[in-house]
Amino acid sequence: MPELWAGTDAGKAAHHCTVIDADGKRRLSRRVANDETELLRLIAEVLELSDNEPVTWAIDLNAGGAALMIALLTDNGQQVIYIPGRTVHHASGSYRGDGKSDAKDAFIIADQARMRRDLEAMHRSDDIAVDLRILTSRRLDLAADRTRTINRMRAQLLEYFPTLERAFDYSTSKAALILLSGYQTPAELRRIGKHRLATWLKNRKVRNYKQVAATAVEAAEAQHTAVAGERLASVMVAKQAREVMALAEEIAETDSLIEGRFHDHPAAEIVLSMPGIGPVLGAEFIAQTGGDISVFGSCDRLAGVAGLAPVPKDSGRISGNMRRPRRYSRRLMRVFYMSAMVAARSCPVSQAFYERKRAEGKSHRQAIIALARRRLNVLWALIRDGRTFQTTPPPPPATLG
């Protein structure tokens, strides 16, 4: 029976699939629409070439436009290997021809899957992990949008009212955003005055309304010049302030959805028991690992994916040099790095580990990364054994006799 490898250059509307045998000979090469019926027809056609034996499929995307094809393949018991686009790009230089085409890329993907033994098989994530990946990605986008909007608002405010721009931290002060939604110019603030502004803020449930009003009016008293374009710029600032508040509300709603869905996962209690990991970081961990860490094989492999396992950088007579891998999951790295930052301040065990690394001469960042790696090993063992984190080790089991 023939052994076949099917390489797929994935796209939004269509994919190109090339099937090769053990000798690297093309057995099939065609373009297929990103449609369930067409993809099922392709799978059946490839399986017919292999006498209905499993085929090794390789694809250059692990989400997005390739999601439907990956789901159909895994549902039909096919092995799917992910080959990053960067790997395909670097490998293409060793193949004949300078041109680039979907057919050539699909052949390279299939041939790389045939020759390489270091590629990991893909597994379909459970529904909870998929939901959390969607929610955490959305939250990341919302947070980025909020930061960009705040920066634009501050830049606009700086052009005509610099005193007020530096009077508040708009990334943390909701009171300042409420203020800007109603009053944005020095003349408006001087006209309403400190006491009436305090009443206006109080009616909108602003905390420390008296202090906020006093700070704003003081800023207005420091500037009596109206800058050109102030009128239109103030309208933009008010609109952006309302956008920031709306984004903050949506982030809070998304956090609530994340927390609720995260608690549905069987490992949620274990993950939350680790100091420094809350529902959002815990959900990110489940999302980025697919909900099942066993697919990584070992904690060392997971550390490599998270960028916490150094790789050799030797050359000539120089050996023993290590560096961080260039390709790793930055979102997974963020989970362990951020949680290690918190744990180094709040968890006695983590704090002691951090201080020991600092005493060894490591910088703050190096000590945090070492702590993050240590915590990854601990979390792996906890999930593997099905137990929660404890600051003191459990007592040894009692022996008879």
Image (spheres, rainbow, N blue to C red):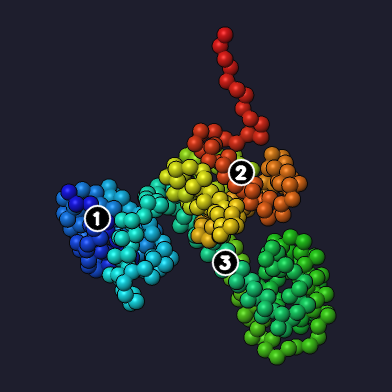
Label disc, if present, on residue 172 of the rendered structure: none
| Crowd around label 3: few <14 · some 14–19 · many ≥20 (10 Å) | few
Q: In this view, does 181 lie to the left or right of 113?
A: right
9 or 281: which is nearer to us? 9
**What residue did someone put label 1 on?**
22
Q: Give the amino acid type for the residue marked by disc 3 in the picture.
A: Ala
Image point 57% across, 45% down: which residue? 376
Q: Which of marks 3 and 2 is nearer the N terminus?
A: 3
Q: Is residue 304 visible?
A: yes
Q: In this view, does 342 lie above or below 177?
A: above
Q: Earlier in the sequence, mark 3 or mark 1?
A: 1
Q: What is the distance, in whole Å, between disc 3 and disc 2 at their CAs?
A: 30 Å
Snapshot quadrant of residue 30: bottom left
Residue 163 percent location from the top left of the image: 78, 77
Q: What is the distance, in whole Å, between disc 1 and disc 2 at their CAs?
A: 42 Å
| Crowd around label 2: few <14 · some 14–19 · many ≥20 (10 Å) | some
Snapshot quadrant of residue 161: bottom right
Mark closer to the observer (3, 1): 1
192 or 104: which is nearer to us? 104
Mark closer to the observer (1, 2): 1
Snapshot quadrant of residue 275: top right
Residue 247 percent location from the top left of the image: 57, 65
Residue found farthest to the bottom? 228
Residue 248 percent location from the top left of the image: 60, 63
Image point 42% across, 67% down: which residue? 90
Image point 51% across, 33% down: which residue? 385
Q: What element carries label 3?
A: helix
**What residue did someone put label 2 on?**
374
Mark closer to the observer (3, 2): 2
Q: Earlier in the sequence, mark 1 or mark 2?
A: 1
**What residue did someone put label 3 on?**
144
